[in-house]
Image (spheres, grey):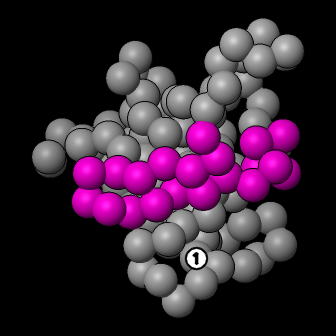
Amino acid sequence: MGSSGLQPFAYYARNMHGVVYNWTRWSLRGLRGIEPWEVMQVLTGQRRWPRRGRNATGASILTIWGRTTAGRALIVGVYQQTEDPWDWQIAGAREMTTDELAQFAQWEETR
């Protein structure tokens, strides 16, 4: 364990399809009430709903809607910084709103 009491983890992770998800220091610091491993569970989970969106500045971003293994519903924002289609930067994550959770639950029923 690190000096903060948190278990150390890599600044990147690769899913079973070879997609690499990279953390930046600012994206890690920006997590509020969400653990990095929960974000990775959503990004590497079997049932993910990718949706185009916009970040707070209006820039295009890909959002991944999914659940952690414990069932927590999160939206994770990712973007591409390079031309490599398998390399994604994690922008941040948040819990779904009530309306978003209703939309996601409806999508889950069709899968």
Q: Secondary structure at mark 1?
A: loop
Is 91 a magenta residue? no
Which is more toward the observer, 4 or 34? Answer: 4
Q: Decide which of 107, 77 is in the foreground and name it.
A: 77
* Residue 90 on image: x %, y %: 63, 56
- Please give left or right for residue 35 compared with residue 73 in the image: right
Quarter residue 17 falls in: bottom left
- Which of these two is toward me, 53 or 43? 43
Q: Which residue is mark 1?
A: 80
Residue 73 rendering spot, x and y as whole percentages: 47, 32
The N terminus sits in image quarter: top right
Q: Is residue 4 left or right of residue 99?
A: right
The stretch of residues the image draws in magenta is 10-29
- From what the image shows, is residue 102 above or below residue 14? above
**Picture residue at 53% right of the left edge, 30% below the top:** 38
Query: What amino acid is at disc 1?
Result: Gln
Residue 80 in the image: above or below residue 21: below
Q: Is residue 53 above or below residue 7?
A: below
Residue at 75%, 37% (x, y): give it.
31
Q: Residue at x 67, y 52 (%)?
A: 23
Would you identify the image quadrant in which residue 3 lies?
top right
Q: Position of residue 80 (x, y in %)?
A: 58, 76
Q: Nearer the viewer, residue 67 or 26?
A: 26
